[in-house]
């Protein structure tokens, strides 16, 4: 071991290797084939889909996983709606109580005025005199403007969040649920998901491989696979163009299909830059840990 490796922290600059060893900040790592799921894997459990079901966007999942995800999301939406309606009810009650207190204060003031015997005109004159005196006291202007300390700005005061008096307040407003229906969580942009809209996918399987029922070629993550929405048969894209679009019927069951019934399966790890899902994973870790 060289002497420099023992004293690698004695430099006056922060080297790239030392910054990597600190292990904080934004991290980026390129994803390989092992980080991608197979074309027939469930996007919820990441295992080979059992009784595979597919949404209209081409995301495959297990039937059990899809049903459980829909039920959990529905229960979460109901809980959020109950919490939201309860918060609105409490806000209305507080508003009514405040209005009632104001009315009571006004009634008490009127009652005291009647008891003292002051007329409204006399009270207005007294109030005007009092306001004029207050304006004179408050309108005092010093000869020189107050000296501001350097750095005593609103932004810097707010940035001192560790001081108890400068700590930001917690926003306790309850917001309504972001979505009113269950969502497909396969991508960063979720879309609506219904149990009736799911399609049962039928693969032709030979031992541990899934084949195209037309050309008997093995289907892989780099293959373009289409599923017919009416019958659920999975066929490679080449056979779709060759047989299905020309005859307008399924190659397996001879069911009449239309071009809108042909749905592409979303695959990852294709090896091509134009597709295959995200290629770089990004993660942020803060330097301060509680």
Image (cartoon, rainbow, N blue to C red):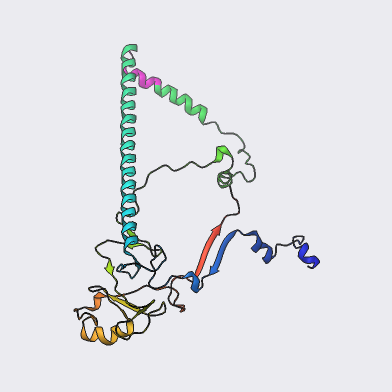
Percent position of residue 144, x then y: 62, 37
Rendered residue at 33%/19% (across/down):
108
Quadrant housing residue 192: bottom left
Residue extending farthest to the left is 256
Rendered residue at 59%/42% (across/down):
162
**Residue 96, placed above or below residue 110:** below
State left or right for residue 257 relative to residue 8: left
Magenta extent: 117-126
Rendered residue at 35%/61% (across/down):
65
Give the prevailing secondary structure in the magenta stretch. Answer: helix
* Residue 269 shows up from this direction: yes
**Residue 163, placed above or below residue 259:** above
Residue extending farthest to the right is 3
* Residue 120 shows up from this direction: no
User: Which one is nearer the viewer's eye here, 260 or 45?
Assistant: 45
Numbered-mark total = 0
**Residue 248, placed above or below residue 172:** below
User: Which one is nearer the viewer's eye here, 158 or 220?
Assistant: 220
User: Which one is nearer the viewer's eye here, 77 or 252?
Assistant: 252
Percent position of residue 127, x then y: 40, 22
Quarter placement of the N terminus: bottom right
Whether residue 5 appears in magenta in the rendering, the answer is no
Percent position of residue 222, x then y: 42, 79
Percent position of residue 202, x then y: 29, 74
**Residue 247, placed above or below residue 164:** below
């Amino acid at each position: 071991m060289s002497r420099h490796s023992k004293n690698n922290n004695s430099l006056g600059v922060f080297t790239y290797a030392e910054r990597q060893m600190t292990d904080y900040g934004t991290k980026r790592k390129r994803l390989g084939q092992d980080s991608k799921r197979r074309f027939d894997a469930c996007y919820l459990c990441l295992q080979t889909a059992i009784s595979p079901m597919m949404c209209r966007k081409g995301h495959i999942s297990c039937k059990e996983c899809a049903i459980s995800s829909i039920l959990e999301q529905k229960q979460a939406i109901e809980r959020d709606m109950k919490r939201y309606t309860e918060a609105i009810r409490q806000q209305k009650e507080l508003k009514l109580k405040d209005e009632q207190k104001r009315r009571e204060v006004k009634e008490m003031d009127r009652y005291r005025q009647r008891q003292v015997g002051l007329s409204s005109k006399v009270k207005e004159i007294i109030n005007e005199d009092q306001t004029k005196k207050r304006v004179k006291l408050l309108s005092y202007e010093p000869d020189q403007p107050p000296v501001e300390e350097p750095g005593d700005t609103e932004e810097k005061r707010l940035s001192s969040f560790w001081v108890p008096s400068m700590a930001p307040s917690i926003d306790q407003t309850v917001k309504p649920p972001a979505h009113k229906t269950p969502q497909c969580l396969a991508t960063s942009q979720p879309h609506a998901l219904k149990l009736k809209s799911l399609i049962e996918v039928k693969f032709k399987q030979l031992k541990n491989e899934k084949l195209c029922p037309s050309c008997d070629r093995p289907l892989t993550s780099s293959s373009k696979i289409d599923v017919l929405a009416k019958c659920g048969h999975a066929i490679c894209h080449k056979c779709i163009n060759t047989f299905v679009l020309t005859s307008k019927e399924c190659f397996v069951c001879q069911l009449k299909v239309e071009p809108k019934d042909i749905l592409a399966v979303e695959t990852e790890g294709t090896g091509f830059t134009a597709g295959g899902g995200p290629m770089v994973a990004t993660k942020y870790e803060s330097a301060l840990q509680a």
